[in-house]
């Protein structure tokens, strides 16, 4: 086809196949969630983090931040949300389970072998920040704190629009579009350049880290189904959060409008810590991990979680 070629989608690895050396799988209903565990690199573990990525992302987007957290004594569990990374793709054949239920079931599985019985620090980036807040609103009793990095809310989808997204042609179109993009490093990097606003970082970035998780079969269909069920947390519920809350924005964020930044910032309870990385884009956790970690460590220390 000349300049363009069609990428080949791959099957989700089964329980015997591991994308990473620290990969694990959790089965629940028709779903298989891929997650990774990074142990604390200190003799004494200070706490444990439950990390949720954003739209189009996967566990690798936390690579730089995980290095910072584990070095300081925090165990990090990062999970691929359904339709992303190496977790189940939602299709018409998958009996739907809400993300909050799936993630709480995974949490319960992880806690079975936790003799300390300690609570979690929930971390969410971009859309993962929205999911993290859904978890907080559902039940914050199992959390010590929540840390939000450039949270981006999906829009609430009504029934007619949901049916439109779930229509078979939509999945075919998105599958085809992905196949034309994900085999070309420069196209993947172009998207991430907009997300990071960091040319030097992207020049050295391994595009396969982002692309491989999008090559799983029916990713386009899954994104359609995921979008059809999208919603966002209620701003009016934000001030009910009682656990320590950290909110970090990127000053160069091209994905989250300032009006949304201000609305969420004003909706959070007075005890929330709100910080900004002025040279950070939307994916600031990747190319500005030092600053992101600095805010996190101060926040954790101030709240007795270090």
Image: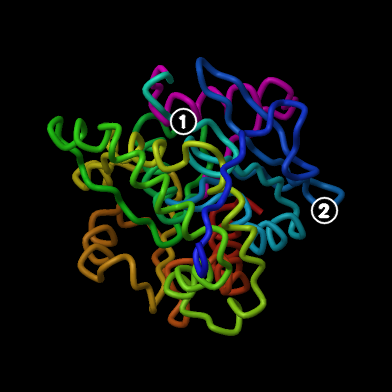
- Residue 284 makes an appearance in the image: no
Q: Which mark is residue 41?
A: 2
Q: Residue, x 70% and y 63% (percent of image)?
A: 68
Residue visible at 40% across and 27% down in the picture: 91
Identify the residue at horizontal 61%, vertical 65% (top origin): 207
As drawn, 138 above or below 257? above
Q: Which of marks 1 and 2 is nearer the N terminus?
A: 2
Q: Nearer the viewer, residue 26 or 306?
A: 26
Give the alpha-carbon distance from disc 1 to disc 2, as whole Å.
27 Å
Graded by Cα atoms within 10 Å as few (under 14), some (14 to 19) or many (20 or more), the crowding at tag 2 reads: some
Give the structural element (helix, strand or loop) at label 2.
Answer: loop
Q: Where is residue 58 in the image (x, y as percent from the top left)?
A: 56, 49
Q: Mark 1 points at which residue?
A: 141
**Circle 1 sits in a helix, a strand or a loop, which is it?**
loop
In the displayed structure image, the side of residue 203 where residue 166 appears, left or right: left
Whether residue 67 sits left or right of residue 234 in the image: it is: right
Q: Give the range drawn in magenta.
A: 95-123
């Amino acid at each position: 086809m000349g300049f363009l070629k069609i990428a080949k989608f791959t099957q989700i690895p089964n329980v015997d196949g591991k994308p990473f050396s620290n990969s694990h799988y959790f089965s629940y209903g028709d779903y298989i969630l891929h997650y990774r565990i990074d142990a604390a690199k200190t003799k004494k573990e200070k706490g444990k983090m439950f990390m949720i990525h954003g739209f189009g992302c996967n566990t690798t987007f936390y690579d730089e931040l995980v290095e910072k957290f584990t070095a300081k004594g925090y165990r990090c569990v990062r999970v691929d949300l359904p339709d992303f990374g190496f977790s189940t793709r939602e299709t018409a054949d998958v009996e739907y389970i809400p993300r909050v239920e799936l993630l709480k079931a995974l949490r319960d599985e992880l806690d079975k072998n936790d003799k300390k019985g300690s609570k979690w620090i929930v971390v969410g980036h971009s859309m993962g920040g929205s999911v993290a807040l859904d978890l907080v609103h559902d039940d914050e009793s199992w959390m010590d704190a929540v840390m939000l990095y450039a949270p981006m809310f999906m829009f609430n989808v009504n029934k007619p629009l949901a049916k439109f997204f779930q229509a078979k042609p939509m999945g075919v179109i998105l599958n085809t579009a992905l196949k034309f993009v994900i085999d070309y490093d420069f196209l993947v990097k172009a998207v991430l350049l907009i997300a990071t606003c960091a040319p030097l970082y992207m020049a050295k970035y391994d595009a396969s880290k982002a692309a491989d998780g999008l090559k799983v079969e029916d990713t386009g269909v899954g994104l359609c189904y995921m979008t059809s069920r999208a919603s966002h947390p209620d701003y009016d519920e934000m001030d009910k959060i009682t656990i320590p809350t950290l909110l970090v924005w990127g000053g160069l964020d091209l994905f989250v409008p300032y009006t949304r930044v201000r609305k969420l910032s004003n909706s959070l309870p007075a005890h929330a810590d709100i910080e900004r990385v002025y040279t950070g884009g939307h994916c600031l956790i990747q190319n500005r991990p030092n600053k992101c970690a600095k805010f996190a460590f101060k926040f954790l220390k101030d709240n007795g979680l270090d």
